[in-house]
Image (spheres, helix red, strand yellow):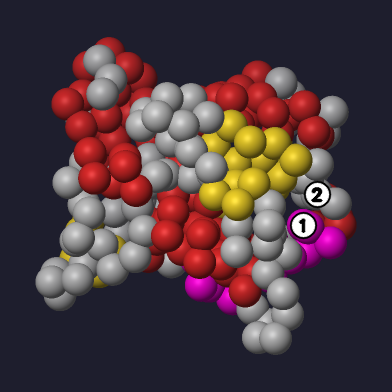
């Protein structure tokens, strides 16, 4: 059976430049839709976090106004998360996974990846093992921040230098009012790391695919990323 790891953060607080914290977690739409698709295609989904701690949902992703979804859609997301509460509350520890039994890694967004996944040793270990084994990695929205963890160990070149990548854009940060509040943005960090960052118009679907790597720009791109990942798994 195909086994796909969904890598999430286990923090619910993102530090801002003014010294306060913004509540954060995973973005429900980016988790539920792909998870359902993976399961519908016969894959086993394994939830992991860097330290094995519970993965919180970003509450804004379940509110129609902030999620740009209908009440019925938000209720559907909530019901799915409730059904899978055990996996989200007791996930696997990222760097303890047996990667020989993993066929793909999927990293969704929400703001929690900016707080934890970009510089966590366990994330770097998981993704490096996947990359070296040729296991496809897919990220969407702020989940692309996890790729930044592979700057370690010091002295080694970032494996995605010069690669065309996408993730949540500065224009999209501006549209949600977080420009100037975040200590760093994903677009800026990817460019600074050496990626060939590319984006489409805010909130439009945008997916970039390479052998072994798929990235998507925003929540609208999550299903396209999931389908592309399944295509690479075969």
Whether residue 123 appears in magenta in the rendering, the answer is yes
Q: Which residue is mark 2?
A: 135
Q: Position of residue 153 (x, y in %)?
A: 68, 82
Q: Is residue 45 visible?
A: no
Q: Residue at x 36, y 59 (%)?
A: 185
Tell me if label 1 and label 2 are in contact, CB under 8 Å: yes
Q: Main secondary structure of the magenta part?
A: helix
Q: Position of residue 147 (x, y in %)?
A: 59, 59
Front residue of 165 and 12 = 165
Left or right? Give the position of 158 relative to 110: right
Q: Quadrant of the C terminus?
A: top right
Q: Does dot 1 land on a helix, a strand or a loop?
A: helix
Which numbered marker is on residue 130?
1
Left or right? Give the position of 234 relative to 162: right
Q: Residue at x 65, y 86 (%)?
A: 154
Q: Is residue 101 visible?
A: yes
Q: Earlier in the sequence, mark 1 or mark 2?
A: 1
Instruction: Name which quarter of the figure residue 220 lies in.
Output: top left
Report the Cα–Cα distance between label 1 and label 2: 5 Å
Front residue of 160 and 232 = 160
Left or right? Give the position of 37 relative to 62: right
Circle 2 residues within 10 Å: few <14, some 14–19, many ≥20: many
Q: Which residues are magenta?
A: 118-132
Q: Residue at x 59, y 32 (%)?
A: 207
In the image, residue 81 above or below residue 49: above
Circle 1 residues within 10 Å: few <14, some 14–19, many ≥20: many
Whether residue 195 appears in magenta in the rendering, the answer is no
């Amino acid at each position: 059976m195909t086994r796909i790891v969904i890598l999430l953060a286990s923090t619910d607080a993102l530090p801002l430049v003014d010294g306060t914290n913004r509540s954060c977690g995973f973005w429900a739409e980016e988790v539920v839709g792909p998870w359902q698709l993976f399961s519908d295609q016969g894959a086993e989904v394994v939830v992991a976090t860097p330290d094995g701690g519970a993965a919180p949902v970003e509450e804004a992703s379940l509110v129609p106004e902030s999620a740009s979804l209908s009440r019925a859609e938000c209720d559907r997301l909530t019901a799915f998360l409730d059904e899978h509460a055990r996996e989200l509350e007791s996930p696997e520890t990222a760097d303890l996974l047996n990667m020989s039994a993993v066929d793909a890694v999927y990293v969704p967004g929400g703001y929690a990846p900016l707080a934890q996944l970009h510089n966590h040793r366990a994330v770097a270990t998981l993704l490096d093992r996947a990359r070296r084994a040729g296991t496809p990695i897919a990220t969407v929205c702020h989940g692309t921040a996890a790729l930044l963890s592979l700057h370690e160990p010091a002295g080694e070149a970032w494996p995605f230098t010069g690669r065309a990548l996408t993730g949540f854009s500065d224009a999209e940060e501006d549209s949600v009012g977080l420009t100037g509040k975040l200590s760093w943005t994903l677009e800026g960090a990817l460019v600074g790391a050496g990626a060939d960052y590319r984006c489409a118009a805010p909130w439009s679907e945008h997916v970039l695919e390479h052998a072994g790597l798929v990235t998507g720009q925003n929540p609208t791109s999550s299903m396209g990323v999931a389908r592309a990942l399944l295509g690479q798994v075969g």
